[in-house]
Amino acid sequence: MTKVVIMSDGGDICSQVIGPTGAEHRRLANRVMQEALDRAKLSFPEISYVVATGYGRLNVPFADSEITELTCHAKGVASLFPEVKTAIDIGGQDAKGLKIKSGKLIDFVMNDKCAAGTGRFLEVTAATLGLRLEDLGTISAKSTHRVKISSTCTIFAQQEIVSRLSEGVAVEDVVAGLHDAIAVRVVGMTRRLKIEPVVVLTGGVAKNTGVVKAVREKIEHEVFVPPNPLLSGAIGGAILGRDIVLGALKEGKPIPKKERALEEVTFFN
């Protein structure tokens, strides 16, 4: 997914947009930016500074700077939960654990080599089960005997799921087992940082109540979820961009904006 957050210099969110990325990153960046501008009733020249983050940050032609998703994510989570010390982000492409102190990232662990433990893992397995991704949390809540999914590879997990179903295991017990498998993998990875409360869970998978429940069980601490767990990185990028602008103004220096060619900020051909 591609996300845009427009923030005022006072820290208020003027608009926010989430759109599926697809294959053409640059075109979608333009489209979601235009939608965010429309919602905020702003024109592009009224935007003081643009920070791009995430995997596609180099494909945002109108960005003034690129900042890593880890830095932006830590900043965004800390703005929502000032006492946060541990953040777990489970997105579509990766899962990561962040150690945060006084609102700043001090260490992290990341799983970006395998789909297991990510949103993609759930997408593939939901398709195998013939279920909608957004229904998995509700379905797992009906489980009375969660089965163990031992495979850590997505392909082998699919085979294991089919085998379990052929044995007569209830779908809800299989789904609950999938959620537990993700929690075991991600929490185990994050334990290398020493998990300390306050713990915050973000990313698209945090919208799945079954995964949230499984993570809470493994951590044995309360786990907080933002109102929109997909936007933490975008919010952090907006805050960092605002800080750059306000810092330049305070020091009486020009805002360090890039020179943009006209065609780079024309959102539609």
Image (spheres, helix red, strand yellow):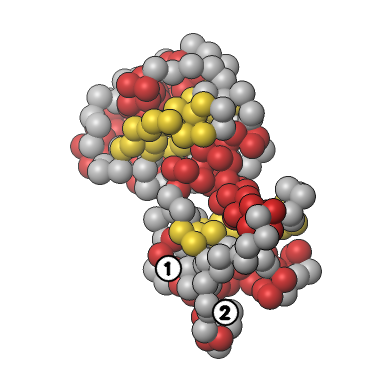
Q: Amino acid at mark 1?
A: Asn
Q: Earlier in the sequence, mark 1 or mark 2?
A: 1
| Label 1 to label 2: alpha-carbon separation | 13 Å
Residue 139, given in percent of the width and then of the height, sits at 52, 31
Specify few, some or many for label 2: CA neighbours under 10 Å numbering under 14, 14-19, or 20 or more. Answer: some
Question: Which of 111/192 is in front?
Answer: 192
Residue wearing tag 2: 265
Going 31% across and 38% down the picture, which residue do you hit?
A: 111
Q: Secondary structure at mark 1?
A: helix
**In the rendered image of this protein, does residue 141 appear above or below residue 242?**
above
Q: Amino acid at mark 2?
A: Val
Tell me if 236 is positioned left or right of 186 in this view: right
Residue 81, given in percent of the width and then of the height, sits at 63, 30
Question: Which of 36/74 is in front?
Answer: 74
Q: Quadrant of residue 37?
A: bottom right
Residue 215 visible in the shown view: yes
Q: Quadrant of residue 115?
A: top left
Q: Secondary structure at mark 2?
A: helix
| Name of the residue lying farthest toward the front | 252
**In the rendered image of this protein, does residue 162 appear above or below residue 212?**
below
Residue 165, given in percent of the width and then of the height, sits at 32, 31
Residue wearing tag 1: 59
